[in-house]
Image (cartoon, coloured by chain):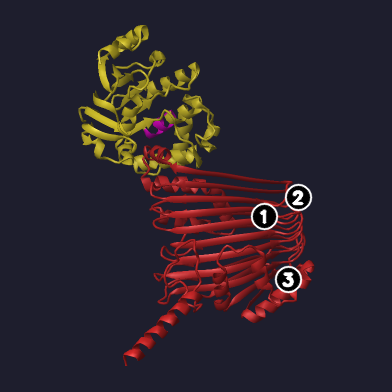
Chain colours: A yellow, B red
C-alpha cells in the first residue's frame, strides 16, 4: 500500500489572470478524514476543482501526487478511474440520462467492468435507502428538477456506488436542511474505511456533529494557514476566521 | 498568327465566362468546386412501399403531366393557374424559395428520374402507407451523384408517411441536390422524415416545398448528420384554414462542416398553426446558420407560429448564427421565437468526465440525451440505430 493517497505541495493555480491558490500543501493518508474550512473566496472550491482537473483553472506551480502518480498530468476521466471523486457544490443536470443508467455507465467506466444488472440494482437500492432517497429517482433524469438536497444526495449515492480512494466533498452541506445534513454526513462517515480517505470542504462546522475529522485545515487567501484537530474547528466556531486573516 | 492566338484566347475566355454565368450560385455557403460539373444522375433510389400508395418513376415530361392532374384535383381554387402548364414551376415560385433560382432550375434540368408518389389511403378507412426512399451508395468506383426532383401528393382526408434516407457508405465522394414538393390535401396528414447521413466530404443541397390545404397537417423531421456542405431549406405554405405544420430539425456538426438551415412557415389561411423546433450540437470548428422565418400573410388571423432553437456548443472553435424572422401582414396573430445557444458546456462535460467518462463519451452522452425526442421518432421509422451509430462515429 502506498503511504499517502494524496500529496500536494506548493500548489498554485489561477483562473484568468487571478491567482487563487498560492502554494497549498496537503497530505492525505489512507483511513483519514480531513476537513478544509475557510471563509468565502479563500479558494476552497478552486482547490477541489483543480484536484479534479477543471479546464478553467490553470495550474501555475507545485505538484500533486495521487497514489504516487502525477495527478496534474492526468485527464479528468483518468483521475476518476484512478479513484478520485468530487461531490460537486453545484451538480449538473443531465437531461435524457436516467440516474440508474448513469450510475451503471459510471461504474463501468471507473471499474472497467459492466456491473451485473440484478446485483448492482440491489446494491444501489440499499444505498438509496440509507440516504433516505426514494427509489423512483432511479428512473428520473440525472439531477433534473431535483431539489438542492436531492442533488446532494445523488452525489453521495454516486460516491457510494463508485467507492473512490479519495472523495472530495465540496460544500456538500450547502442547500441541505438539518435532517438532510445528518443523513448525508452519517452516510459519508459510514463510507470511510481504512483504505480510503475523505476530504470535506465546508465553511461552517455543523457537519462536525456527524463526521469525525482526523485533521482540520484552515484555508485563507489561497494558503493553508493553520492545521489542527477538532479543537481548531471549535475555535473557528467561537471566533470566526478573523484571527487567521491577520496571520496571512 | 499572333492575332489568331489572341482571338482564340479571347474566345476561350468568353466561353468560360458564359459557362460561369450559367453555373448556379449560392451566396450563403461557398459551395465546393465541381458541385455542378457532374450531371450524371448515377444513383438509383430504391422505393419500398408498405400499404397503398401509388408510385411512378418517370422522366420529366410525364411526371409533370401526372403531377398536373393530381394537383388540379387537390387545388380547385388554382384551376386558372394550372393552365400555364408548368405546375411544378409555379409551386416552386409560389412557395418562397431559399435556394437560388439557378440551383432550382439546374436541379429541374438534370433530375432525370423523378418520383411521383400519391396517397389515396383514407384516414380511418385504410392503413397509413409508409413509403421509404433510400438513396444509398455502397462499394463502388463511381462518384455518388444524386439529382432528384420528386413530387408527393396526399389526397383530401388521406395519410402518408414518407421516409427519405440518404446514405453514402462508399469511399467515394458524393453529392445530393434535390427538390421535394409535397401537397397535403384537405384534412390530410403527411409525415415526412428526411435523414441525411452522407460521407464526411460530401455535399447536400436540398429544398422541400410544402403546401397544406384546409385542416391538413404535415409533420416533418429533418436529421442532418453527414456531408461537409449542407444547404437545407423547408418552405411550408399553410394555405388552408386550420392547417398545421410541425418541423423537428436535428443536426450534428463536426470538424469543418458548414451548414445553412432555413425553415419558413408561411401562414396564409386563418387559424393556422406552426412549430419549428431545431436542436443541434456543434463540435470541432463546424459552422451553422439557422434561419427560422415565420410569415403571416393578410388573412391569417388567429394563427400561431412558434420557433425554438437549441444549440449545444461542444468546442470553443464552433460558430453558430441564428437569424429568426417574424414577418406580419396581419395583426391578430401570435409569433414566438426562443433560442438558447449555450456556451461550450464545459461544466457538464467536466461533471461527466469526473465520473470516469472520456471526453468523447461525455459528448456522446449529452448529445444523444438532448436528441432523445427526435431519436424516439426515428425509432418509429426504423432509423434510430443508424442515427445513433453515426453520432457515435462522428463524436469519436
Query: Which image quadrant is residue B141 in?
Result: bottom left
Q: Chain of mark 3?
A: B
**Quarter of the figure with residue A165:** top left
Identify the image quadrant of the N terminus of chain A. top left
Residue at horizontal 41 percent and vertical 65 percent from the top: B201
Name the subunit of mark 2: B
Image mark 1: chain: B
Q: Are marks 3 and 2 in contact (CB under 8 Å)?
A: no
Q: Main secondary structure of the magenta part?
A: helix
Q: Which residue is mark 1?
A: B245
Q: Foreground residue, B324 or B141? A: B324
Dot 2: element: loop
Numbered badge on residue B301:
2
The residues tagged by marks 3 and 1 sit, at their Cα atoms, a distance apart of 20 Å
Q: Earlier in the sequence, mark 3 or mark 1?
A: 3
Q: Whole-Å distance between the Cαs marked 2 and 1?
A: 16 Å
Q: Which residue is denoted by mark 3 in the rendering?
A: B71
Residue at point 44% right, 64% down? Answer: B30
Extreme front residue here? Answer: B3
- In depth, the one of B196 and A40 nearer the eye is A40
Q: Give x and y (percent) for residue A100.
A: 48, 38
Of badges 3 and 2, nearer the viewer stands 2
Amino acid at each position: 500500500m502506498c503511504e499517502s493517497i494524496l500529496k500536494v505541495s506548493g500548489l498554485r493555480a489561477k483562473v484568468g489572470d487571478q491567482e487563487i491558490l498560492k502554494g497549498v500543501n496537503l497530505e492525505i493518508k489512507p483511513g483519514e478524514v480531513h476537513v478544509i474550512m475557510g471563509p468565502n473566496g479563500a479558494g476552497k472550491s478552486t482547490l477541489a476543482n483543480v484536484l479534479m482537473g477543471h479546464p478553467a483553472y490553470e495550474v501555475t506551480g507545485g505538484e500533486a501526487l495521487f497514489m504516487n502518480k502525477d495527478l496534474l498530468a492526468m485527464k479528468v476521466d483518468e483521475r476518476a478511474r484512478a479513484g478520485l471523486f468530487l461531490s460537486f457544490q453545484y451538480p449538473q443536470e443531465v437531461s435524457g440520462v436516467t440516474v440508474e443508467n448513469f450510475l451503471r455507465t459510471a461504474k463501468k467506466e471507473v471499474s472497467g467492468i459492466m456491473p451485473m444488472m440484478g446485483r448492482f440494482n440491489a446494491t444501489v437500492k440499499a444505498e438509496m435507502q440509507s440516504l433516505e432517497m426514494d427509489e423512483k429517482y432511479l428512473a428520473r433524469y440525472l439531477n433534473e428538477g431535483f431539489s438542492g438536497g436531492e442533488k446532494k444526495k445523488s452525489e453521495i449515492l454516486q460516491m457510494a456506488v463508485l467507492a473512490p480512494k479519495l472523495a472530495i466533498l465540496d460544500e456538500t452541506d450547502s442547500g441541505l436542511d438539518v435532517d438532510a445534513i445528518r443523513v448525508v454526513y452519517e452516510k459519508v462517515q459510514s463510507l470511510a474505511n481504512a483504505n480510503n480517505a475523505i476530504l470535506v470542504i465546508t465553511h461552517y462546522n455543523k457537519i462536525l456533529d456527524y463526521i469525525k475529522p482526523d485533521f482540520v485545515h484552515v484555508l485563507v487567501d489561497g494558503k493553508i494557514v493553520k492545521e489542527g484537530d477538532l479543537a481548531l474547528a471549535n475555535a473557528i466556531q467561537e471566533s470566526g476566521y478573523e484571527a487567521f486573516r491577520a496571520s496571512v | 498568327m499572333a492575332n489568331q492566338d489572341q482571338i482564340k484566347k479571347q474566345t476561350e475566355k468568353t466561353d468560360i465566362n458564359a459557362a460561369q454565368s450559367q453555373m448556379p450560385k449560392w451566396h450563403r455557403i461557398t459551395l465546393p468546386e465541381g458541385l455542378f460539373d457532374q450531371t450524371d444522375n448515377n444513383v438509383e433510389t430504391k422505393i419500398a412501399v408498405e400499404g397503398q400508395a401509388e408510385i411512378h418513376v418517370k422522366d420529366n415530361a410525364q411526371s409533370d403531366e401526372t403531377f398536373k392532374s393530381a394537383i388540379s384535383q387537390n387545388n380547385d381554387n388554382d384551376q386558372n393557374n394550372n393552365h400555364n402548364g408548368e405546375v411544378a414551376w409555379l409551386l416552386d415560385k409560389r412557395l418562397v424559395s431559399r435556394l437560388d433560382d439557378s440551383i432550382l432550375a439546374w436541379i429541374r434540368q438534370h433530375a432525370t428520374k423523378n418520383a411521383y408518389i400519391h396517397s389515396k389511403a383514407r384516414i380511418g378507412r385504410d392503413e397509413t402507407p409508409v413509403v421509404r426512399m433510400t438513396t444509398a451508395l455502397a462499394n463502388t468506383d463511381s462518384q455518388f451523384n444524386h439529382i432528384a426532383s420528386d413530387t408527393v401528393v396526399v389526397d383530401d382526408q388521406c395519410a402518408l408517411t414518407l421516409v427519405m434516407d440518404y446514405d453514402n457508405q462508399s469511399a467515394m465522394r458524393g453529392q445530393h441536390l434535390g427538390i421535394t414538393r409535397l401537397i397535403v390535401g384537405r384534412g390530410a396528414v403527411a409525415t415526412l422524415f428526411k435523414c441525411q447521413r452522407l460521407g464526411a466530404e460530401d455535399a447536400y443541397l436540398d429544398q422541400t416545398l410544402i403546401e397544406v390545404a384546409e385542416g391538413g397537417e404535415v409533420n416533418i423531421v429533418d436529421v442532418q448528420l453527414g456531408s461537409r456542405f449542407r444547404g437545407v431549406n423547408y418552405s411550408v405554405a399553410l394555405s388552408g384554414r386550420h392547417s398545421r405544420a410541425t418541423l423537428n430539425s436535428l443536426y450534428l456538426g463536426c470538424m469543418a462542416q458548414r451548414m445553412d438551415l432555413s425553415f419558413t412557415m408561411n401562414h396564409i389561411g386563418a387559424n393556422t398553426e406552426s412549430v419549428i423546433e431545431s436542436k443541434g450540437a456543434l463540435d470541432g470548428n463546424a459552422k451553422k446558420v439557422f434561419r427560422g422565418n415565420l410569415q403571416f400573410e393578410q388573412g391569417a388571423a388567429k394563427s400561431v407560429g412558434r420557433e425554438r432553437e437549441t444549440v449545444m456548443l461542444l468546442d470553443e472553435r464552433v460558430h453558430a448564427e441564428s437569424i429568426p424572422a417574424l414577418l406580419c401582414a396581419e395583426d391578430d396573430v401570435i409569433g414566438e421565437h426562443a433560442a438558447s445557444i449555450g456556451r461550450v458546456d464545459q461544466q457538464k462535460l467536466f461533471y461527466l468526465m469526473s465520473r470516469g467518462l472520456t471526453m468523447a463519451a461525455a459528448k456522446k452522452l449529452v448529445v444523444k440525451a438532448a436528441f432523445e425526442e427526435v431519436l424516439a421518432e426515428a425509432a418509429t421509422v426504423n432509423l434510430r440505430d443508424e442515427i445513433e451509430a453515426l453520432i457515435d462515429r462522428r463524436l469519436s
